[in-house]
């Protein structure tokens, strides 16, 4: 018996009821954090194989038949089908990713891969992005398997590799090479949604992701005349690039309010008792009343482009013939054409651009039976819950599933303490998730699967 299995057994045996959906969620989250799946975006790192094998073991113990998929060694995704009480219903895709962004241990107050419990939280890289939801899904599944309770409809479970680098070795690869594993799926739930923002003691907004911005990671390149650093050079590639990068970095993008953003603003206006009219000019200041999520919501009101990397030259007295820069561009749903045209105008004729990673900006309506199941399962565990849609500032594997026509929502439910900087936990130092939030999420997910 492995140490991880022993710890899970001890934890679940200590629980009042091993068929409770939250019986194993904390220990599974800790186990997953202890498996370092750092994704550096290149050949570094151990890959996701260790975590995939761990997940596959838990699924097999619950009676499922997991399959491992690898586009290359160690870059592993797990797929399993969980039969539902109504086998004729279309399967629901429930997805999470196994990789995490790297962590520099010296910056942390705890071991980022220790899975330590401290101050009522599980600490470590992946605690909120997104081994917490992986753990919720696995804990709920195993509890229901012990109790002989299938979900209402079939569920396709997918735990992917490579999400943190755009999913080319994970979700996108599965869509291109193995779309059959998702056959019949029309709806999906995954990360970055379903978490609470406290408005007052008796009211919490739970943000459900219904859209996300498109991704345009670009490499800019300037070419000039190489030469001696002491000579006058009006054809300096570094100068040309620096000016273009500066124009991009300082550009003020106009407001572009999508249906998901407007729906969020309407819901937040009602909850806060203020008018969040995006045309009033002070909407971002008023959003500050929502606390730490204000900067996240602010990023969804418009397209953005941030220079992130510069590279040129090899010696101080040599003018290089080429200089490059990387830019992280994001565009709102429907904003792709305007975004690219603006970038081309900003860089000018002497700079070329190529896409490092380009992906869509999906958006769906906050309506239907699946949404009603989210609302009712949240209220059953938190009577002060009010679900509202929102546009996510970054990107997820939903971009890949959208290519198959699957309607995607971000719904990884967490009731959070009012003072927790949840947005700051994503890719941040001392990432952590409250143990009670994990347990809450497992209970909500359990209810949701009976209704979804």
Image (cartoon, grey):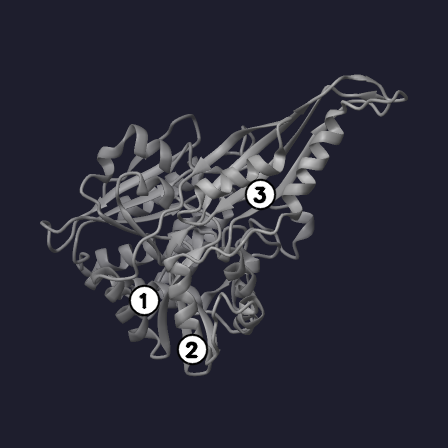
Secondary structure category for the residue under label 3: loop
- Between disc 3 and disc 1, whose residue precedes? 3
Tell me the residue at 60%/46% (across/down).
103
Q: CA distance from mark 3 to mark 1?
A: 30 Å
Q: Which mark is residue 102?
A: 3
Q: CA distance from mark 3 to mark 2?
A: 37 Å
State whether residue 190 appears in this view: yes
Q: Nearer the viewer, residue 384 or 73?
A: 384
Label 1 crowding class (10 Å Cα cut-off): few <14, some 14-19, many 20+?
A: many
**The C terminus, quarter of image:** bottom left
Secondary structure category for the residue under label 2: helix
Residue 140 in percent (x, y) is at 30, 58
Residue 387 in percent (x, y) is at 35, 69
- Residue topped by disc 1: 443
Q: Residue at the right extreme?
A: 230
- Between disc 3 and disc 2, whose residue precedes? 3
Q: Which mark is residue 383?
A: none
- Residue topped by disc 2: 271
Label 2 crowding class (10 Å Cα cut-off): few <14, some 14-19, many 20+?
A: some
Label 3 crowding class (10 Å Cα cut-off): few <14, some 14-19, many 20+?
A: some
**The N terminus, quarter of image:** top left
Secondary structure category for the residue under label 1: helix
Say which of marks 3 and 2 sits in front.
2
Q: Please give left or right for residue 181 compared with residue 128 in the image.
A: left
Tell me the residue at 40%/47% (across/down).
334
């Amino acid at each position: 018996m492995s140490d991880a299995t022993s710890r899970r057994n001890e934890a679940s045996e200590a629980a009042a009821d091993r068929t409770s959906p939250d019986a194993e969620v904390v220990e599974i989250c800790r186990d997953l954090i202890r498996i370092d799946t750092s994704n550096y975006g290149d050949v570094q790192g151990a890959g996701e194989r260790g975590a995939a094998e761990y997940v596959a073991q838990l699924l097999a113990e619950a009676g499922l038949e997991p399959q491992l998929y690898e586009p290359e060694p160690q870059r592993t995704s797990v797929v399993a089908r969980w039969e539902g009480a109504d086998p004729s219903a279309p399967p629901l895709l429930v997805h999470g990713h196994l990789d995490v962004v790297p962590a520099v241990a010296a910056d942390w107050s705890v071991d980022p891969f220790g899975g330590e419990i401290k101050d009522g939280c599980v600490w470590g890289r992946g605690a909120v992005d997104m081994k917490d939801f992986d753990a919720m899904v696995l804990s709920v599944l195993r509890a229901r398997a012990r109790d002989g309770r299938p979900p209402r409809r079939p569920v396709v479970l997918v735990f992917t590799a490579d999400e943190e680098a755009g999913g080319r070795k994970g979700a996108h690869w599965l869509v291109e090479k193995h779309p059959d594993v998702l056959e019949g799926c029309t709806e999906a739930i995954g990360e970055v949604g379903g978490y609470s923002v406290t408005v007052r003691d008796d009211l919490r907004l739970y943000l459900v992701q219904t859209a996300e911005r498109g991704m345009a990671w670009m490499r800019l390149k300037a070419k000039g005349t190489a030469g001696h650093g002491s000579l006058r050079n009006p054809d300096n590639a570094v100068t040309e690039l620096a000016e273009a990068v500066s124009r991009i970095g300082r550009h003020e993008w106009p407001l572009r309010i999508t249906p998901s953003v407007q729906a969020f603003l309407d819901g937040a206006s009602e909850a806060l008792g203020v008018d969040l009219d995006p045309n009033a000019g002070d909407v971002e200041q008023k959003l500050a009343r929502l606390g730490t999520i204000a900067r996240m919501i602010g990023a969804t009101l418009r397209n953005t482009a941030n220079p992130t990397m510069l590279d040129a030259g090899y010696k101080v007295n040599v003018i290089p013939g080429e200089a490059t820069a990387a830019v992280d561009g994001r565009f709102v749903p429907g904003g792709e054409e305007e975004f690219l045209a603006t970038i081309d105008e900003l860089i000018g004729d002497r700079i070329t651009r190529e896409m490092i990673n380009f992906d869509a900006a999906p958006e769906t309506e906050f309506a239907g039976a699946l949404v009603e199941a989210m609302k009712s399962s949240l209220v059953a565990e938190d009577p002060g819950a009010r679900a509202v849609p929102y546009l996510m500032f970054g990107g997820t594997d939903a971009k890949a599933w959208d290519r198959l026509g699957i309607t995607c929502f971000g719904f990884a439910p967490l009731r959070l303490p009012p003072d927790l900087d949840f947005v700051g936990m994503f890719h941040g130092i001392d990432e952590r998730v409250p143990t009670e939030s994990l347990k809450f999420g497992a209970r909500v997910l359990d209810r949701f699967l009976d209704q979804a």
